[in-house]
Amino acid sequence: MEPNFAIFPIPATWHEQWAERTGPVGDRVTSADRAPAASALRRLACGLGKTDFPSLLFDFVSTLIWHDSGCVMHYHVDHLPQLLYTMGEEREVAAYYFGSDPQASDPYLKSWRSGAAAAVHTLDEVMSLECDPAFYISRFQPRAGFIDEIALFLPVDEASCISLFIERCDARFDADEVSALKDSFPAIMALHEAHLQVVRGIDPATHISALNKAKTLSPRERDILLLLLDGRSTGEIAQRLTLTKGYIKNCRARMYRKLGVESERAMLSLFRPGFSVVDDPSTRVGAG
């Protein structure tokens, strides 16, 4: 099966880009050298909601940790991966990957499908899963020309994610570098989520305002909100929570006041399609 290449330009090699940003190849980005990250962040903010956002996000991550090559993939629980963007990788390598049955041989894809969660994973971590190490380590890795690799999983929905891969050709990522990248991951995830909100037609500022208002709801009111967002009727919610319909109606009236709306439709529109963010585990139905 031919790989699905999105129409993104393949930029200059990483070594050229790195020299332009930070000086000689191999220099590490330090806290004193913030200009490349600031510039990449500005470009990323301007790219929210646009088709080249994955490449801009990769460019921003490139300023946080030194590497030689990488790519951006789209993973899905049921479908073959899609290649969205490459940097410093030959298309022949991608074609070899897609011709090798990635659903059986890609340890990162297996890791995503086993947990489907936002995360940063090293090659050592995913190789602990049951996969075919003979292919990935012995055949694909030498062909791709990297020694070590890290993946960032950024969920799009419950079934898919954008996966950023950064690779190093001459040395392994050390523990401090991995730790620093994991510390930066919440900020990277927040940028990704802001992009999704724009794509889905939700202004990020409006969405943040809605989240702040949601914090004023009681645990029981959040239970009711989640069930309303799930399409449940007043009767179904009352039965699920073992409450009366009258109690549910009174709760909704209080929720309208707290959220500054006048109808159920207006209330639900505050959170769709990003409503899952109000699903705090401590306030889920049946918790506590």
Image: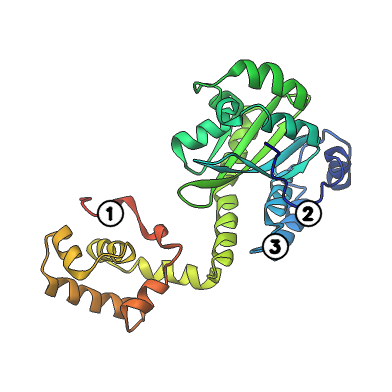
- Res. 66 visible in picture: no
- Res. 227 visible in picture: yes
Is 221 or 155 nearer to us in this picture?
A: 155
Residue identifier under label 2: 35
Is 152 or 3 nearer to us in this picture?
A: 3
Residue drawn at x 63%, y 15% is: 134
Point out the image quarter for the N terminus.
top right
Is 226 or 208 nearer to us in this picture?
A: 226
Query: Which one is closest to the eye, mark 2 or mark 3?
Result: 3
Image coordinates for residue 266, horizontal then vertical, percent: 38, 79
- Disc number placed over residue 15 in the picture, else none: none
Residue identifier under label 1: 284
- For marks 3 and 1, the one nearer the N-term is 3
- For marks 2 and 3, the one nearer the N-term is 2
Say few, some or many: other residues with alpha carbon within 10 Å of mark 2 (under 14 / 14 to 19 / 20 or more): few
Residue kind at label 1, given as amino acid type: Arg
Residue identifier under label 3: 47
Q: CA distance from mark 3 to mark 1?
A: 35 Å
Residue drawn at x 72%, y 46% is: 5
Residue drawn at x 42%, y 58% is: 277
Image coordinates for residue 29, horizontal then vertical, percent: 76, 41
Residue kind at label 2, given as amino acid type: Ala
Q: Are marks 3 and 1 in contact (CB under 8 Å)?
A: no
Where 184 sits versus 266, above or below?
Answer: above
Query: Which one is closest to the eye, mark 1 or mark 2?
Result: 1
